[in-house]
Amino acid sequence: MKVVVQEALFDPWEEVRNYQEQNLPKGKHGGSVIFVGTMRDFNEGVDGISRMYLDHYPGMTEKHIERVCEDAMNEWDIMDAYVVHRVGEIKPDEPIVLVAVWSRHRAMAFDACRFIINDLKHRAPFWKREQRPEGEHWVEGNTADERAARIAS
Amino acid sequence: MKVSVKYFANMRDRMGRADETVELDEGATVASLWAKVSDEPMPENTLIAVNMEYTNTEEALKDGDEVAFFPPVTGG
């Protein structure tokens, strides 16, 4: 399991390939579920967002995501989890977050990946400030995952 | 006792500072710390962490604690 919070742009597919080669025993995992969150140039009905700044709470952010990954590994029979999240300046079309989960069977990987990204979006201390045509704007809340809420209720 | 306080995102803008050290009486809670750093009531949706763990306004503080106030998170 590994959690990285970094400013540098990354290629999520290369990260997945490298992590898998270095950390997963060959021939043992039957499924991997990969979530990549990408920056849009529109949000909340506003077009033309040219960039954003991602603020975070150094130390708590890493600690929080590590604990969520540990919870996922305890809850589901998954083999490994790898999370990369950027901070600082981000431009449209660039990846913001990667959540990769490997397991013997697909169901566990789907559930664990969804659990990690949903917790990350609602509990990990990151904050987006968008550069909109009319000026800078702190995003005030993430959209709810309605399907997850329905399943949980 | 002394605690260090951090503010993030629009809470930092609102407070006009990113961090500070605050002297408190023994037995102080997160709520009494807030009353000392701000004349305004705490915004309803404020999240609070003490030593990087989520908590609420009733938590009792001790010397050397790190307390953070911030708005709902928007990562991912």
Image (cartoon, grey):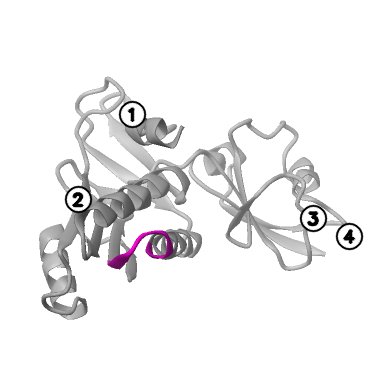
Residue farthest along the top direction in this orientation: A45
Q: Are marks 2 and 1 in contact (CB under 8 Å)?
A: no
SS category of the residue bearing label 1:
strand
Left or right of A28 in this view: B61: right
Where is A150 relative to A52, above or below? above
Question: Which residue is found at the position 77% from the left and 58% from the top?
Answer: B61
Picture disc at residue A95: 2
Label 1 Cα crowd, 10 Å radius (few <14 / some 14-19 / many 20+): few
Which residue carries the number 3 mark?
A: B60
| Residue B51 rendering spot, x and y as whole percentages | 63, 62
> Seen in the image, is A1 located left or right of residue A33?
right
Measured from the top left, where is residue B16 in percent x and y? 58, 42
What secondary structure is found at the residue carrying circle 3? loop
Mark closest to the chain's N terminus, 4 or 3: 4
Q: Residue at x 11, y 75 (%)?
A: A27
Q: Which residues are magenta?
A: A73-80
Q: Could you tell me which chain the residue with mark 3 belongs to?
A: B
Label 2 and label 4: CA atoms lie apart by 47 Å
Quadrant in the rendering for residue A78: bottom left
Residue at mark 1: chain: A
Q: Quadrant of the N terminus of chain A?
A: bottom left
Left or right: B56 in relation to A112: right
